[in-house]
Structures are given as C-alpha cells and as structure tokens.
Image (cartoon, grey):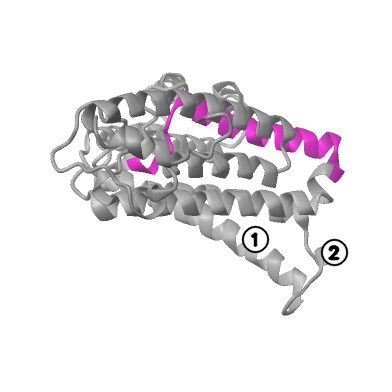
C-alpha cells in the first residue's frame, strides 16, 4: 500500500496536488487508529520521511500539516477509542459510504419495478446493484454494531464497537473480496453482470443474517459483549427468551450468514467458500470456549439449555 503512495509523492505532479494528498493521508492516519496492525507503522514512517524532506526544502505546508496531526495524536477526543472525535469521524465516513451506495442501490431497484408484482431484470444495471448493495450492507453492519451496543451499554461504548478494525484477518478478507471481484470482472464479466438470481439470493441471505444478529443483540441488551467474558459480570443473566429460545448463539449465526451472503451477492465463488470455511473455524473454536465458560457459570441451567437449542451453523453442534 505504501509503495504506490511513495511513487506518487516522488513523481513530477504539481506541489499542490502532492500537498493535498499528504494532508489527506495525515488526517486519515491520525483520526482512524489502526492500532499498529499492518498499515500504521509503514504509513507513519512514510509520512515522517515526506514531511522531513519537504520541511528541509522549505515547504511550510507540510510542517503545518504535521503540527495538525501531532495535535490530533495528543487530543483525547481523537487519540482514544472512547474519544467522541474518533467516534464521530468514523460514523461520518460510514454515513457517507452507506448513504451514497444506498442511493444507487435503491435507484436500481426502482428501475426494475414498474407495477406491484411486476419486476424487470433487464432494466437493472447488475454491476451497480452488486457493488452498491455490498457497500450498503457493509456500512450498515458496522453502524448497527455500534448503535446496538450504545443503546444498552453507553458507559462502555467506544470506537471499537464499530468493529471496523476487528482483526487483521477481517481486514485482509475485506480486501480479498474486492480483489477477487475486480479480477473476475475483467476475466469473466458475465459472472458479475448476468447471474442476477445469485445476486438477489446473496442479498437476501445477508439481510436475514444481519437481522438475526440485530435481534440477538437487542434481546441480550446489556448482557451482550463483543468479547468473550471469562468472568461473570455482576448482574449477567443467561438469556433463554426470544430468539435465544431456539438459537444458542444467534449473533454468531447471523454474522456467519451475513458474511457469506455478501460474497454470494458479489458472486465471488472463491471468497464465498473461503469466508464460509474461515467463519466456521472461527466460530467453532469460539463457541466451544464460550460454552465451557457458560457451563462453569451456569452449571445447572446451561447443559439443559444446550440440549434444547441449535447453533444453525453447518457442522457445529
């Protein structure tokens, strides 16, 4: 990621263009903390080098930009996960991406709908449908993660509840989805333009999965946590009502089908299989660890509850 940026900055592009690019990179790097995962060290080293070189060359704009980023790095509103600045900027970016793509997605749907129960696939640009639908689902997923947590646990809600930096594996998976999509678009354009029933099925799977996860989070309320709790919190209860009456881990079930559905929507066969396999491995381990803790915390209740419910993720009992 750094090499292309470095090439641009070392090119003969006008200084104002280079200055604007550096300012943008500095702001993004300062506000959205990557917590040292993959990008931050290389980007920080690159920006330090650029600003030092240009400061020596007499370009004061870079020095001023660097002062701004230092202020952001020391400002508690932006340099902490609990900071309202970091939360606000993340929400703003998700809103722009989600709103922009939702507009295109709904526009394509309206092109195909003429009268009630009459739907024409020929009037829809399925390429726009794929991408705009995917980014709409992705933006709403991250927003709903934060929103659902903030409603019931306002004191512990932070930037991390957006789960945009869930893990290195999650970031790599997101990048891989786009790489596969555009490679296959170049090599097999019909795969991304003519398999409209696959796109619709993928979208519906993702919507249902997202709905299951949201219902699960709102059923748990303050008992829900993004991190497995090794010690039982005061007031924590074993939830056995609502959707938990049928599914033991509906938030995991929802996430599994949401993630796989997004790849079916994009018609990414490789990533669809990889997402399903990786998600299965992740949740099989996590559910096993979590249930061992729940049996310790609820030795009388949980074994009986486990026998009466399902996980509904393939090959996980």
Residue at the limit of the structure toward the left, as seen here:
234
What residue lies at 69% left-to-right and 43% top-to-bottom? 264
Residue 25 is covered by the magenta coloring: no
Judged left or right of residue 50, residue 182 is right
Going 73% across and 37% down the picture, which residue do you hit?
A: 182
The tag earlier along the polypeptide, 2 or 1, is 1
Instruction: Give the image location of residue 245, x and y in percent.
Output: 39, 49
Residue reaching furthest bottom? 115
Q: Quadrant of residue 172?
A: top right
Tell me which segment is drawn in magenta: 161-190
Q: Is residue 187 magenta?
A: yes
* Residue 61 in view of the camera: no
Disc 1 on helix, strand or loop?
Answer: helix
Left or right of 166 in this view: 68: left
Q: Is residue 283 left or right of residue 132?
A: left
Category of crowding for the residue at label 2, using alpha-carbon neighbours closer than 10 angstroms: few (below 14), some (14–19), many (at least 20): few
- Identify which residue, 233 or 89, lies in the foreground: 233
Nearer to me, 266 or 38: 266
Q: Which of the two residues, 21 or 151, is positioned nearer the viewer here?
A: 151
Determine which residue is flagged by label 1.
105
Where residue 181 appears, x then y in whole percent?
A: 72, 37
Asked which quadrant contains residue 305, the reply is: top left
Q: Residue at x 62, y 34 (%)?
A: 13
Q: Mark 1: few, some, or many residues within 10 Å (few <14, many ≥20)? A: many
Residue at image position (79%, 45%) is: 192
**Residue 169 appears anywhere in the view:** yes
Residue 122: which numbered mark, if any? 2
Up-down: is 34 above or below 83?
Answer: above
Q: Is residue 55 above or below residue 97?
A: above
The label number, if any, that marks residue 29 in the structure image: none
Q: CA distance from mark 2 to mark 1?
A: 15 Å
């Amino acid at each position: 990621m750094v090499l292309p940026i470095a090439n641009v900055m070392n090119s003969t592009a006008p200084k104002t263009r280079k200055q604007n690019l550096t300012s943008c990179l500095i702001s993004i790097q300062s506000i959205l903390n990557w917590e040292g995962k993959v990008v931050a060290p290389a980007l920080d080293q690159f920006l330090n080098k650029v600003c030092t070189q240009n400061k020596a060359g007499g370009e004061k704009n870079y020095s001023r930009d660097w002062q701004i980023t230092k202020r952001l790095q020391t400002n508690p509103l932006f340099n902490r996960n609990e900071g309202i600045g970091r939360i606000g900027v993340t929400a703003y970016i998700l809103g722009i991406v989600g709103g922009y793509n939702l507009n295109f997605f709904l526009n394509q749907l309206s092109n195909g709908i003429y009268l009630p129960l009459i739907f024409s696939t020929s009037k829809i640009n399925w390429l726009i449908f794929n991408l705009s639908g995917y980014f709409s689902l992705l933006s709403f997923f991250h927003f709903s993660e934060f929103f659902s947590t903030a409603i019931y646990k306002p004191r512990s809600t932070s930037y991390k509840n957006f789960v945009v930096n869930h893990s290195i594996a999650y970031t790599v998976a997101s990048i891989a989805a786009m790489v596969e999509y555009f490679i296959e678009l170049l090599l097999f354009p019909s795969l991304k333009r003519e398999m409209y029933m696959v796109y619709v099925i993928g979208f519906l799977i993702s919507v249902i999965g997202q709905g299951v996860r949201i219902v699960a989070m709102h059923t748990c309320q303050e008992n829900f946590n993004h991190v497995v709790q090794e010690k039982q919190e005061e007031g924590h209860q074993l939830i056995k009502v609502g959707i938990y009456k049928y599914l033991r881990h509906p938030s995991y079930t929802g996430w599994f089908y949401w993630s796989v559905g997004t790849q079916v929507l994009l018609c990414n066969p490789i990533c669809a299989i990889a997402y399903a396999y990786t998600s299965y491995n992740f949740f099989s381990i996590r559910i096993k660890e979590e249930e061992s803790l729940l049996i310790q915390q609820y030795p009388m209740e949980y074994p009986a509850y486990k026998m009466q419910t399902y996980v509904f993720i393939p090959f996980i009992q």
